Amino acid sequence: MEILHKRFSRDLWRLTRLYWKSEEKWRALALLAVIVALNLGSVYMLVLINKWYNTFYNALQNFDAAGTWAALRDFAPLAAIYIIIAVYAFYLQQILQVRWRRWLTERYLGDWLTNRNYYRMQLWKTGTDNPDQRISEDVGLFVSLTMGLSLGLLKASVTLVSFAGILWALSGTLNLPLGNGQIAIPGYMLWVAICYAAVGTWLTARIGRPLINLNFNQQRYEADFRFSLIRLRENSESVALYGGEAEERNLFRGRFARVIENFLELVRRRKILVWFTSGYAQIAIIFPTLMAAPRYFAKEIQLGGLMQITEAFGRVQDALSYFVDAYPQLAEWRAVVNRLSGFTDHMQAVMVMDREKDIRLTGHSAPEIIVTSLDIDLPGGENLLSSLELKLAPAATLLIAGPSGSGKSTLLRTLAGLWPFGKGTISVPRGQKVLFIPQKPYLPLGSLRQALMYPGTPGRVSDGVMREIMELCRISELIDHLDTTADWSHILSLGEQQRIAFARALLHQPEWLFLDEATSALDEPTEKALYQLLQDKLPRTAIVSVGHRNTLNAFHRGKLTLTGNGQWNILY
Ligand SMILES: Nc1ncnc2c1ncn2[C@@H]1O[C@H](COP(=O)(O)OP(=O)(O)OP(=O)(O)O)[C@@H](O)[C@H]1O
């Protein structure tokens, strides 16, 4: 089937084997074995129930009241066992799905956060849209569709084999007149079922093919729309101050229109499919009776036989029509596998690009940071900074200045190992702590204490020390809220957030501290006090600041000026 072509199989196997070859594989395989056994058990029960049809309807046809009651009595345990099997097959399948999803989500989260992939992926813009959706939704969908469809296929195959045998044995031989003689078709009901299902499957595949792309796009448009809403929430204040509601609404409308447009197309396509599949299912109700009736009226079979044949036909036809019923899900499955593989490929491509990048950031045993022949480029290839040579001794202080857009922040990004475009070598002392403070410090979701300690926990810090540092950094009014959880990045002023970043530096006590316009929102006396604090409390820390204000000169012994067009000069 085209829907399951080669590339899809490769991608599917790549995604599936992650879990089934993981450390959890034995537990998972054991659970899967039980689930498969239960599914086989349920098919066996259906075979028994099919036999029961014969006994029951024959008793009815013969007006055998005792036989009918006995048959009804026999039905109870069959139904009870079938129900128990169905419940546990469902329950255990869900449990296995949850475990698989948990494992795979962990894995994707890990890969996304490793090697700063989340950052690099957006820097190299090719590829994946909405990685958050891939992790939060697609992983779950992938797991449930893979489990559901493969168990469905297994069940359909086993049902097919079991009931094809029954149908063959029951349907006898049909003698069709042909010219002067007759042609005998043994097991003809089985052939009828196969032809019926083959035509159905072929037509479904034809009608349903466009669903694959439509499903793929639907997920993507929904995620784009959701993301634009989240962005407004994140930037509510700026939008409110600008009064940008009309613009935002236009953006939402545009994105939502795409959601609806695609959805309508999807519905139209599915409507055609529903026309077909429900017609197909209705015909399947009378079709076998019609086919088996000649033998019934010829008194070759009894009512029980007719009912048993009809039921067996239904089962075979159901099993053969697996693709007809599962088509919309197969289309969705393929879209999900596409999206997850695209995401995985993109992450791997980023890692390869990262390994091959020409800016080498290495650890060495010398105490200085040494930058040699560093060229920094923009993603498009234009040069931002040429042949930079820089040596930073421990406890050095350096101010990086220059006009806006000359590349100061990008230089810091490069030193942090984030910026991949360019060439040259940056050697940093091994095993030392480096802290970068951006202009707008990031405050994680959680308490203020967590925000102060971010990233990680710099050992246990007593309340006393924490208070002292907060007082020194002029945020003593926040001491009482240390353990309050709130959206702090929206509550605190930029100046307060910048003071929190200084407190962070004092808590972490890094050997190397890089500040990118970290005091831009502070008044000059506060800026002075905080820089003085760094000098007093972190005398062994090297400080590299980016800033426009001349007041910063007093706190730095060296000055690197980026003059534009890739040029620079340095004064120690
Ligand atoms: N991800 C990116 N893709 C393309 N161009 C970028 C990217 N990031 C930065 N740039 C460009 O690189 C140039 C340098 O930016 P950078 O932020 O380093 O300047 P800066 O000197 O720190 O400026 P400012 O003083 O205004 O903060 C700018 O022209 C900017 O547009």
Image (cartoon, helix red, strand yellow):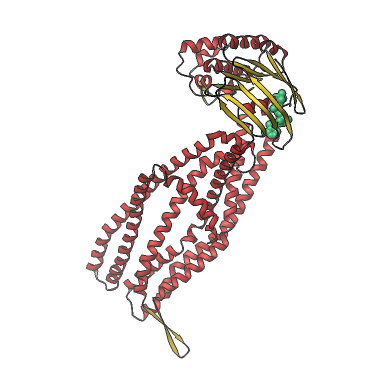
Image side of residue 28 versus residue 15, left or right: left
Which residue ends up furthest to the left in the rendered image? 66
Can you give x and y, in whole percent of width and height, for residue 506 in the image?
54, 14
Q: Nearer the viewer, residue 324 or 293?
A: 324
Can you give x and y, in whole percent of width and height, for residue 510 in the image?
55, 18
Q: Quadrant of residue 348?
A: top right
Q: How many marks?
A: 0
Image side of residue 563 versus residue 174, left or right: right
Decide if residue 245 is in sight here. Answer: no
Can you give x and y, in whole percent of width and height, for residue 351 in the image?
57, 39
Taking 441 as reference, is 155 above or below it?
A: below
Q: Quadrant of residue 418?
A: top right
Q: Quadrant of ligand 1?
A: top right
Taking 159 as reference, is 404 above or below it?
A: above
Q: Nearer the viewer, residue 406 or 482?
A: 406
Taking 118 as reference, is 562 above or below it?
A: above
Q: Residue at x 53, y 48 (%)?
A: 336
Can you give x and y, in whole percent of width and height, for residue 477 in the image?
55, 11
Quarter containing the C terminus: top right
Q: Residue at x 66, y 17 (%)?
A: 398
Decide if residue 541 is in sight here. Answer: yes
Q: Quadrant of residue 152?
A: bottom left
Q: Nearer the viewer, residue 501 or 381?
A: 381
Which residue ends up furthest to the bottom in the rendered image? 180
Q: Nearer the viewer, residue 537 or 46?
A: 537
Taking 325 as reference, is 371 above or below it?
A: above
